[in-house]
Image (cartoon, rainbow, N blue to C red):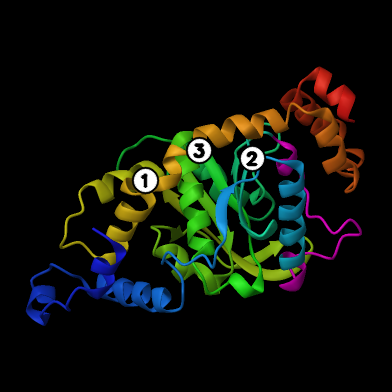
Amino acid sequence: MGMGAIVNRPERPRQAADEGRVSPSAEKQEKRLALLMRQGFFGSDTRSAVIRRAVTVDELEAAYRLVHDCAAERGGMEPAPSGLRLRLWEALPDTATFVAVVGGKVVGVQSLVMNSPELGLPSDATFRDEIDMLRMGPWPTRSGSGRIVCEAANQAVAPAYRHSAVATELMRCLFAHALMVGCGELITAVSPGHSKFYELLGFETISTVRSGSAQSDTPAVLMRVNVSDMVDRVSEADDDSDGATLFIKCRCLASNPYRGKVRQWEAGAQALFADPQGLRRLFEASGLLSRCSEEEREAVYRSWGADVFAAAS
């Protein structure tokens, strides 16, 4: 079933809703999905942007420049002299960064960060208690399994592409990669005003509103989706399910073209992190490694390997 069928199907009679076929909340979800699609989201028009994983130094550098500029624009960080937003998680090979590229220019970014025993996750600084609950496993799930915790981070889209399918195509990449690596819990810290967008993808809010970072007072909430539960739920969906559920089934899972590409992209990304010259070029400008504590440098050392670390730092 295509997305046109989801959005354009006739309204169900009120009696059907009263019989429990469509709940009021599901009707709201369908209306919100249709509205966002009319605004350019959840469609197929990326305005000629090609969506892929960043597997070159040039693409990663351009990606983290866009993340820097968007974060500074919304008050999420102070502008850095390097013009890059690079943190320790961006130095780890397990962090997958996806980009939307138009004419060689990066216009959209989305990263998936896997939990690191040494470094944790970017949102630990603000939402440590909630994330620890997900790591330990008492949070209720249908499947009772899947406790690899990953974070969707570095969300950034250039202004000219914000009312297009770029953001949702990048999320499709992220879901494809999350499924490949066996992600159990997927979290993201977002502005409260953006939470409805993520609810359409199956996320729920699990925190109070807090300052999003130590550098700013920008409010944020933590949202999560148990990926195993999401897969189980949408596998049961049929043509009478709500539009949001069908969107996830059709676009993020069953008909997600990026699921056939993520393994090839992973090989390219791992090759990038085996190139000390490229790593030196990427991380020297930001001075990231020079600012690391000994424990943090040790984590990067183990991720890169002794030979690559020695040649790159």
Q: Label 1, secondary structure: give it.
A: loop
Residue located 38% across and 79% down the image: 35
- Upstream in sequence: badge 1 or badge 3: 1
Real-space Cα distance between discs 2 and 3? 13 Å
Residue 111: image x %, image y %?
61, 49
Find disc 1 in the rendering and name its residue. Answer: 140
Real-space Cα distance between discs 1 and 2? 27 Å
Residue 8 versus residue 227 in the image, above or below: below
- Furthest toward the front, the residue is 103
**Quarter-of-image position of residue 102:** bottom right
How dense is the environment of label 1, judged by Cα within 10 Å: few (below 14), some, or many (20 and up)? few
Query: As drawn, is 241 to the left or to the right of 72?
Result: left
Residue 115: image x %, image y %?
60, 38
Residue 234: image x %, image y %?
27, 51
Amino acid at dot 2: Thr
- Upstream in sequence: badge 2 or badge 3: 2
Amino acid at dot 1: Pro
Residue located 81% across and 35% down the image: 279
Magenta-span inclusion, residue 83: yes
Find disc 3 in the rendering and name its residue. Answer: 262
Labels 1 & 2 near each other (Cβ < 8 A)? no
Q: Label 2, secondary structure: give it.
A: loop
Q: Which residues are magenta?
A: 71-92
Find disc 2 in the rendering and name its residue. Answer: 95
